[in-house]
Each structure stands twice: as structure tokens, then as C-alpha cells.
Image (tube, rainbow, N blue to C red):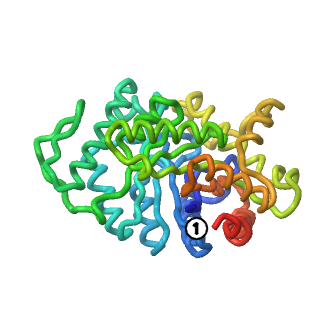
Amino acid sequence: MKLGFGLITCQRFPGETRSDEELYADALDLADLAEELGFDSVWVSEHHFVDDAYLPSLMPMCAAIAARTSRVEIGTGLLLAPLHEPLRLAEDAAVVDLLSRGRLILGLGLGWRAEEFEALGVPLEERAVRLQDTVAVLRQAWSGAPVTGGELLTYPGVRATPSPARGGPPIWIGALVERAVRRAGRIADGLMATEVTPATLAEQVAWARQERASAGGDPATLAVGLHLPTFPWKGSEEEAWEHVWPFHRYVAWKYDDMDGARGRGGPPPSPPPASREEAASLREGIVLGTPERVAEQVRAFDEAGGGDLHYVARLYWPGMDPALQREVMHLWAEEVAPLLR
């Protein structure tokens, strides 16, 4: 099993006093620390035009992490493929892959926010075909073949340079529903899952591998990744929950708030009080507890995924005290990870 650290977003938590320069510098320091502590990978995530300044530009961030580290894989979880010009993405990813000496994992997603698609001039209804075309263009560009495009996006047979390391970064696709999961199995090198239980992860992996086999591929070669909110703690589970609750609540609420925040300026607002039902749902969706309890939960996901899971522990918490953030990373590395390897 591989163990990752993420998802770095550089969001400005309500009341945050640090500057954006300090938040980005701290993100690079955390990536450096993740490598020092033995994590296998570091992951970043993309959104645009959000009032808390959610990280919008992943390739520069990945290049900066590559320059600060020497061993960890660097993953995008996820880069919103339909919002990017595919040929330029192929070039940018190739450069990052070379700078990192072949450590990039290019995780792609569909996207869903209408504001992002409208502002960047991409029809929302074209997102699925654009994702598929992006994968086709990336593979053409990195193979050295003439780039002609796909179903919607076409090119005049140009040849993209430079060539990335090892034939190009592995392409993973994030998916939730069956149709999207099967698409990932058919056209990608890996599936990136989230918001699952062990049972639903097993179901998704079965769908993806069935589709891979139907397309003539080897289902055993499909990588499986999973990112989930994670918080190990030496004390009681209640104490762990009290420490992480404000930040877990904010990250989850912000996804619901994004649509209503269209065009909103000024400092980001705090979320309203959560209902009892919402709090219970959030608690069910986080891997939480003592190191032994966290390792037990992660092992259950690994078994559901068929073994060799790439588990990305979402240990990056916008707004959390930097000292507590680092304490939890050390706890994961020193007391959870040894139980999983």
C-alpha cells in the first residue's frame, strides 16, 4: 500500500491572518515535511473563483513541490480537465514530469461548477467528451505521434515536445457514479475514488476493472487510489473530533457554498451552525481515532480495493494551527504508517 498526504488547496480559512504568500510557503514546507516523514506522495486540488482563494493553478504548484522534494510522487487530485486546453496541458505536464524526474501522477476530473465553466468559456454539457478528448490528446502528445485530437477537439498533426519521463505520467480519473467509474476503467491508468465505504469502493473497483477487461486491457494493471478526510489522535475519539471538527466542517461546507458564492468578494464567511444530522454525516465520512483505529479503517479500504491501494490521507486542514497540523502528520508517519506496511 502507498500512503499519500493531501489535499493541498491553500484555502483561506475565515479569520486567517497569514498572507497568501505565507499560506503558499507553508504548503511547500508541508510537502517537504511529508517527504521527510516517509509519505509516498503529495497531492494538490483545483478550483477557481472561490472567495477563500482555493488553489486554481496546479502545474506551477506541482513544479514547486518537485523543486523542493526528491522522492515523493506528486499528484493532482484532481485537475479539472475540461477547463484546460489539452495540448498545453500535455506540454505543462511533460515539463513538470521532467522537473520531478518522473514523479507526476496526473489525476483528472470532470468538474461541476457552472461559474468555472462559464468564466473559462467551456460549455458544461461538453465536459465528459472534453475529458475523453483530453486523455486522447495527452497520450498522442506523450507518445511522439502527431496530435490530431479526439471527438470534439482536433489539431493539425503537430508533434509536442519535450517528451516526458517514462513515456508520460500515469493518468488517473476521479469518479463517483457508475458511468464515470467505468469510463475511468476504460481510458485511464488509475481510478481515484472518494466519498466511499469499503463496500462501495469494492463495487467501484469491480466496475472499473470489468470495463478495462472489456476494452482489451489487463484489469490487474488498473491503479486504485482513494482520498478521504483523516485525523489520527492519541487521545479519545471525542477529543480527536473536537480538534478536527471546525476544519472538517469548513472544507465540506465550502463545496456546498461555492455555487452560492458566485462573484462574492471580501473575506470568506464562516459556515452557519451545522445541524445534528449534518454533523453525524460528517463524522461518518472521516477516518478518525487512535492510530490503531485509523490503521484498521484504512486496511478495510485496502482489502476492498483488492490490495495495493494508494491511500491519500487528507491531513491538510485549512485554518488548523500549523503546530497541530504538523503534530498530526508526525503521528500518522510514526504510529499509523508502520501498521500499514
Q: In this view, does 242 lie above or below 37?
A: above
Q: Where is residue 265 in the image (x, y as percent from the top left)?
A: 56, 38
Q: In this image, 223 relative to 188: left or right?
A: right
Asked if residue 57 can be seen in this view, the reply is: no
Report the residue at 63% width, 40% height from top. 196
Q: In this view, does 253 lie above or below 318?
A: above
Q: In which quarter of the image is residue 340?
A: bottom right
Report the residue at 57% width, 41% height from top. 51
Q: What element carries label 1?
A: loop
Q: Position of residue 83 (x, y in %)?
A: 37, 39
Q: In terms of depth relative to the viewer, which is nearer, 120 or 106?
A: 106
Q: In this image, 131 relative to 332: left or right?
A: left
Report the residue at 63% width, 43% height from top. 267
Quadrant holding the C terminus:
bottom right
Q: Position of residue 245 (x, y in %)?
A: 78, 47
Report the residue at 71% width, 40% height from top. 270
Total marks placed: 1
Where does label 1 land, which residue? Answer: 39
Q: In this image, 165 relative to 203: left or right?
A: left
Asked if residue 102 can be seen in this view, the reply is: yes
Q: How crowded is mark 1: few (under 14 residues within 10 Å), some or many (20 or more)?
A: many
Please state which amino acid type lies under the numbered disc 1.
Phe
Quadrant holding the N terminus:
bottom right
Q: In terms of depth relative to the viewer, which is nearer, 285 or 11?
A: 285
Q: In terms of depth relative to the viewer, which is nearer, 312 or 88?
A: 312
Q: In this view, does 145 lie above or below 130?
A: below
